[in-house]
Image (cartoon, grey):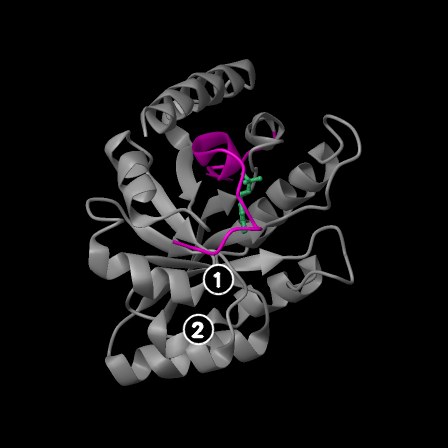
Amino acid sequence: MEHIAQNIARIRAEMEEAARAAGRDPREIQLCAATKMNDAEAVKAAVAAGVDCCGENRVQELVQKQPLGAYEGKPVHFIGHLQTNKVKQVVGKVDLIQSVDRLELLECIEKTAARLDLVQDILLEVNIGQEESKSGFTPDEAMETASKMVQYPHCRLLGLMAIPPISEEPGGNSKYFAQMRQLLVDIRAKKYDNVSMTCLSMGMSGDYADAIANGSTMIRVGTAIFGPRNYGQPQK
Ligand SMILES: *Cc1c(COP(=O)(O)O)cnc(C)c1O
């Protein structure tokens, strides 16, 4: 587990460098550990080494690791595609749902949160590369949805999340990151009710420095913290 702490220290140093190069305060940028396919012990090691939060992709992994205290001491976020029939296992159990990628899901989260009498923090996921294979709002839809957040009083919209296309060359995603930053600024300028637009979640192991250069306030890093995921192996 020692490699996890070493990796996090290295990533923190690189985050700081990228922030300073962009004239930003490094404290503006949070490190979210993308914990999919890593067991509770590995997640605890990342928490102990000082990540700001954990992001879980699959409901099944969330409900397995949470009772083991995997995330204890740090917020846990949901960052994967969420089916409506699993919403009740997530609402109120996580601090932030980053991956609200369609209206139907927002409506389901609202109803569930209302029933539980709580307010769920969310981000809207934007399909910034307009990829067929990915879910997410278009930028126009994200703007429109933000304008209607007053209709969802049991949700609070804190910002945007994106997973841009896999880049062919270094820096290839900068234009998408810049578009996301602009969209965040544009929505924030409208001062919609129930919308704060303080969080811009973008950047992963391969491109977080570019994301920070383009305004990211939260990077989601898996491989660079935990090492390669072993998709061939059964999950522990
Ligand atoms: C897996 C995952 C990440 C992290 O990816 P790495 O390339 O391993 O850093 C970030 N965001 C989401 C939504 C993910 O599913």
Q: Which mark is residue 192?
A: 1
Within the image, what quadrant is residue 16 found in?
A: top left
Decide which of 138, 163 is in the foreground and name it: 163
Residue at position x 70%, y 33% in the image? 174
x and y percent of residue 107 in the render?
Answer: 48, 80
Q: Which one is earlier in the sequence, the residue at label 2 or at label 1? A: 2
Within the image, what quadrant is residue 140 found in?
A: bottom right
Secondary structure at badge 1 equals loop
- Quarter of the rendering occupied by the N terminus: top left
Cβ of mark 1 under 8 Å from ligand 1: the answer is no
Q: Which mark is residue 150?
A: 2
Q: Is residue 177 left or right of residue 189?
A: right
Residue at position x 33%, y 35% in the image? 51
x and y percent of residue 158 in the render?
Answer: 42, 55
| Span colored in magenta | 214-236
Q: Is residue 48 above or below residue 183?
A: above
